[in-house]
Image: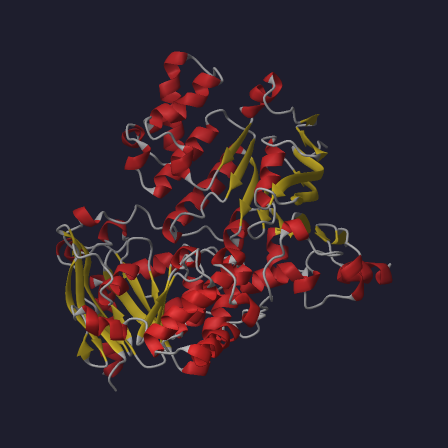
């Protein structure tokens, strides 16, 4: 079956500095894909590039296929039919994404008029329905309020309402709960889950929090220094991480129950994009490093059903296992 | 037997805030009747969401802010008031670490100079040996002399936080207050700093108050943990007990809302509503409007801390009753 959206060999450079080194993945209809990685890994840039939201100075190449049609580098007019209608995006800081001097009604009406051409009574009714849907109590009255009159969690609900106003097939949620307290985070994630069940919308959840991604996504892609280093089903990734970096990330997370163990920190820091290692970007921090790792960047290769890894050492080991099992 | 190194009794801090220029002045009880004790060499974790008063409590305990009521004792003597000569001498014995290391470092001084500065200010050691001592301090936090020659802007986030830590340790403090020290760091770097904090605590016998919203990190570094909600401590216990068997409904919700990799939440407790405004705190138990187990008494009477076991205390009517009927 054709995926809803497929990204193929996407690269991005700023001023001759390459920050995205050929990213590939796809999202099926109604699927929830998690994108994890630390700051600078390229998880947000991937989507800004795919939706044509980067400044002109950025050099973008590759293909982004929405229902089989390439939208990368499409004219603004064509992109306007995609952004907000087919693919919507929400960000970490709702307060700065909302206009502080306009009421919620004005801002919601604007998107509804733009994407759905609504006006008059049907517009008012739809505004109220959306606020009800995202769980803002007393929606009728609250529509006349300004963003500062809402809490952080409520503002994120309003952002979600706005993203839903165009009935998108895919929602890109970029760290939607990072700025929120943990009990409010639970509310927002529950809301996103409920909306997805009701509308069948697909979602890409970008997060640095492995727990958040694990609990809310079907599949996960792990990014490091502008590349996807591992793709797996959510449960598999956490039970049996392949890539040494995924392994390190999971070991670095303090457990909430059971015995306390010393955290397995990953030594060193993320490489500077202006000064990338010649081979695997993770090699300088990796315990499994070999001569091959220093020379050639590894490609993503399948090591199991729905399981890809970009690591010379692990890929060789796992592929051998797969081969043995086949015999 | 010696008493606790740090002892706070019935601390209260009220801030006056005004809505708009002509608005009525309202009083916000940021910290309300908080008592805590930290034994020598012990780490007490303080968790809570934004606005729970955990940072204010940290500042009160350090004497950086004057409490409106209550008393802080340090090493069996009252904490001197801020700005006095005694306080200044005492400042070498207690240190604080904040979330943002870049804001805590002087951009125009090299790292080595900044680590040396407290030695000059407090006139510690021979002048000629101070650079040597500063280098030793850098080494103790895994930074090299080369790092010492750099400016804060030339270090990564994790390295900066380690530099802040080295500077805080320069005066050989007995007591360290860490306010969200790893919250701004990526997971793999966070693990490095958490491990370092645990090692230093072990090696130097430091006493710590560790403030964070992150339950996992708090559990990892703390011996005992206190949970705050709206300016009050609602539960305390040993780090392992508290998170494996939380008693207070709020602690239960916090633990259940904390996402865990590899687990799909089925029976998550999702609290309704936002944390109430501290300026308009609910009557009775401040948590009752969001509590699924609220009794009639919760609306009227504020629960006091009771002790279900020797190492545990909880401020909740559910347990006060249990105790009474058991007694």
Residue B268 is left or right of residue A226, and the answer is: right
B174 shown above or below B191: above
A78 shown above or below A248: below
Q: Is residue A298 something that shows in the picture?
A: no
Q: Residue furthest bottom?
A: A1
Residue B61: name its quadrant: top right
Residue B134 location in percent, x, y?
38, 24
Q: Is residue B98 something that shows in the picture?
A: yes
Residue B236 location in percent, x, y?
67, 50
| Picture quarter with the N terminus of chain A | bottom left
Residue A237 location in percent, x, y?
36, 69
Which residue is drawn at the image coordinates 39% and 48% (left, top)? B185
Residue B75 is left or right of residue B303, and the answer is: left
Which residue is drawn at the image coordinates 40% and 74% (left, top)? A164
A25 or A190: which is nearer to us?
A: A190
Residue B39: name its quadrant: top right
Which residue is drawn at the image coordinates 36% and 74% (left, top)? A113
Count all numbered tags in the image, as a single digit.
Answer: 0
| Picture quarter with the C terminus of chain A | bottom left
Residue A317 is left or right of residue A150, and the answer is: left
Q: Residue furthest front?
A: A120
The coloring applied to the image is: secondary structure
Residue B18 location in percent, x, y?
61, 43
Which residue is drawn at the image coordinates 76% and 61% (left, top)? B299
């Amino acid at each position: 079956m054709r995926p809803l959206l497929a990204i193929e060999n996407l690269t991005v450079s700023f001023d001759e500095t390459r920050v995205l080194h050929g990213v590939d993945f796809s999202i099926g209809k109604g699927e929830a894909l998690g994108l994890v990685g630390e700051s600078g890994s390229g998880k947000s840039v991937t989507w800004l590039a795919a939706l044509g939201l980067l400044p002109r100075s950025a050099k973008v190449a590759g293909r982004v296929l929405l229902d089989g049609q390439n939208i990368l580098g499409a004219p603004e007019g064509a992109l306007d039919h995609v952004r907000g209608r087919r693919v919507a995006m929400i960000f970490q800081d709702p307060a700065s994404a909302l206009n502080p001097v306009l009421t919620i009604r004005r801002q919601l009406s604007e998107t509804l008029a733009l994407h759905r051409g609504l006006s008059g009574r049907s517009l008012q009714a739809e505004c109220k329905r959306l606020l009800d849907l995202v769980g803002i109590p007393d929606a009728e009255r609250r529509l006349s309020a300004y963003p500062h009159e809402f809490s952080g969690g409520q503002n994120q609900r309003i952002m979600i309402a706005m993203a839903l106003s165009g009935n998108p097939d895919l929602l890109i949620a970029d760290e939607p709960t990072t700025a929120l307290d943990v009990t409010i985070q639970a509310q927002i994630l529950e809301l996103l889950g409920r909306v997805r069940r009701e509308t069948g919308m697909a979602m890409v959840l970008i997060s640095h929090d492995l727990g958040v991604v694990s609990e809310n996504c079907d599949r996960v892609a792990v990014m490091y220094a502008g590349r996807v280093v591992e793709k797996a089903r959510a449960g598999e990734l956490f039970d049996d991480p392949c890539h040494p970096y995924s392994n390190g990330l999971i070991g670095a997370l303090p457990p909430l129950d059971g015995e306390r163990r010393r955290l397995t920190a990953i030594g060193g820091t993320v490489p500077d994009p202006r000064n990338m290692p010649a081979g695997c970007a993770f090699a300088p921090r990796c315990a499994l490093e070999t001569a091959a790792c220093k020379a050639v960047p590894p490609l993503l290769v399948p090591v199991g059903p729905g399981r890809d890894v970009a690591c010379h050492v692990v890929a060789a080991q796992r592929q051998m296992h797969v081969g043995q099992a086949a015999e | 037997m010696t008493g606790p190194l740090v002892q706070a009794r019935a601390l209260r801090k009220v801030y006056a805030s005004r809505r708009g220029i002509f608005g009525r002045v309202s009083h916000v009880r940021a910290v309300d009747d908080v008592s805590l004790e930290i034994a020598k060499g012990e780490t007490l974790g303080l968790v809570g969401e934004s606005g729970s008063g955990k940072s204010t409590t940290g500042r009160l305990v350090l004497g950086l802010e004057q409490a409106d009521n209550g008393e802080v004792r340090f090493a069996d003597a009252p904490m001197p008031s801020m700005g006095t000569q005694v306080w200044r001498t005492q400042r070498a014995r207690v240190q604080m670490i904040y979330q943002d290391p870049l804001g805590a470092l002087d951009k125009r001084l090299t790292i080595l100079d900044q680590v040396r500065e407290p030695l000059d200010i407090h006139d510690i050691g021979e002048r000629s040996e101070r650079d040597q001592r500063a280098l030793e301090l850098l080494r103790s936090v895994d930074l090299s002399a080369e790092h010492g020659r750099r400016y804060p802007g030339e270090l990564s986030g994790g390295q900066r936080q380690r530099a802040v830590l080295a500077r805080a340790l320069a005066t050989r403090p007995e007591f360290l207050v860490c306010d969200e020290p790893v919250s701004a760091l990526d997971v793999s770097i966070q693990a490095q700093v958490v491990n370092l904090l645990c090692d230093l605590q072990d090696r130097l016998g430091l006493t710590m108050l560790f403030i964070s919203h992150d339950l996992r990190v708090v559990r990892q570094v703390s011996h005992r943990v206190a949970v705050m909600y709206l300016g009050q401590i609602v539960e305390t216990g040993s780090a392992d007990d508290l998170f494996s068997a939380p008693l207070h409904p709020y602690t239960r919700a916090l633990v259940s809302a904390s996402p865990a990799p590899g687990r799909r939440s089925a029976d998550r407790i999702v609290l309704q509503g936002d944390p109430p405004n501290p300026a308009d705190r609910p009557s009775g138990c401040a948590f009752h409007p969001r509590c699924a187990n609220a009794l009639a008494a919760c609306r009227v009477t504020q629960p006091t801390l009771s002790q279900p076991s020797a190492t545990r205390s909880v401020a909740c009517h559910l347990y006060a009753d249990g105790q009474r009927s058991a007694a």
